[in-house]
Image (spheres, grey):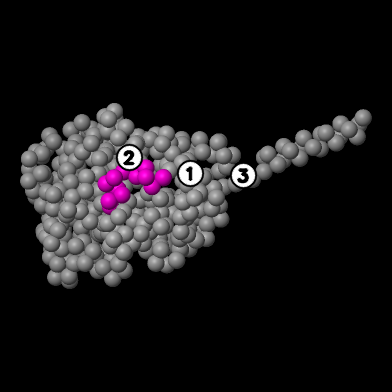
Amino acid sequence: MKKVILTVFMVLLLALVAACGPRQSLKLFIPNEYIDESLVRAFEREYGVRVSIITFDSNEVAVPQIEANSYDLVIPSDYAIEELVSKNLLQEIDYSKITDFSLSDLDETLSSVLDALEADGFDLLKYGVPYFWGNVGILYDTTKVSTAYVEAEGWNALANQTYDVMIYDSSRDSFMIALKALYGNTVSINSPTDSELAAAEQWLKDAKGPKTSFLSDEIFDAMLKPAQFAMAVSYSGDAVYLMSENSDLKYHVPSQGTNVWVDAFVIPANAVEVDLAYEFINYFLSYDVALDNSLEIGYTSPRADVIDYILEEEEYDAEAYRVILTENDEFFRYDTNLKRKIEEAWVRVRAS
């Protein structure tokens, strides 16, 4: 009898040890505050796994980290994905493993963006599954500057030194703004000449005044009521959130053109938990979770049905949440030489 009891005890003990042992773990590398962590915890409970969230501040920081480390799933932007592909750092997406989301679920405008990018030489969908997407525009305080003025001036409004202005501390975005302000759609943000880059550098230097600030994530505190700036360069998803918190704010995308971007799930070539990465993609792009995640974070979902629901229910302002593509809009392409020139010029702008 004692042997039977001992045997049963040992079986239970071994089962308990197994249950308390290390769980399967997914290493997720994403931008700061870019996912609803309560949904991540729900995924952990449902699948009995752990998700380690590692964050990065910019794509420029993320790429060398992906080269040097091992992650199971990453969410970079389109041009960074192109760079990672050029360095053979990504696996191709196996769409047979994505069962809760289909490319037919994509918003029609997003599909046209991806088609245009493919026609331009880069098939993002071969290596990435869209997560969020959006554009860059001007978030402005209607108590300090009029809608008519912002719409009439476009990007040039940022150069008016009588206003407190926040320009995003990003060489890439800032030179896009300057090139669009100067040339509209006559010069591509991906292929400016040296003289056009010099003109853009001078535009930024001239725009920089005593009331101009170069900031990044500080926008979240700076534009809450009362807003510290009359105008601020903003990503559309950040504008969505801030407009929901401050009713004085509006968002405008200048007709001169802007950058439309797509952030996507990618699986690194050295990923360990590949199957779990696909489970995570499936989970976060299923309708219910994609809806909850977009409502929490504020960025535009790739799913047409999620976008339709949010706008029909007036959960967020359509000005920022609905991405409208114009003929002057562009997406960034990966170009090491242009990147170097812009970064060097940005140093000079910041120091001027």
Residue at 21% across, 67% down: 191
User: In the visual, does 112 lie left or right of 30?
Assistant: left
Q: Which numbered marker is on residue 99? A: 1
The span picked out in magenta is: 102-113
Quarter holding the N terminus is top right
Q: Amino acid at mark 2?
A: Ala
Q: Is residue 26 at all visible to an observer of this figure?
A: no
Quarter holding the C terminus is bottom left
Q: What secondary structure do most residues of the magenta stretch adopt?
A: helix
Q: Amino acid at mark 3?
A: Arg
Q: Are marks 1 and 3 in contact (CB under 8 Å)?
A: no
Q: Amino acid at mark 1?
A: Thr
Magenta-drawn stretch contains 110: yes
Give the percent coordinates (x, y) of residue 190. Answer: 23, 64
Give the percent coordinates (x, y) of residue 342. Answer: 24, 65
Cα distance in 3D space between marks 1 and 3: 24 Å
Residue identifier under label 3 = 23
- SS class, disc 3: loop
Q: Nearer the viewer's eye, disc 2 or disc 3?
A: 2
Residue at 23% across, 34% down: 317
Q: Dot 1, how many residues are within 10 Å of its Cα: few (below 14), some (14-19), or many (20+)?
A: some
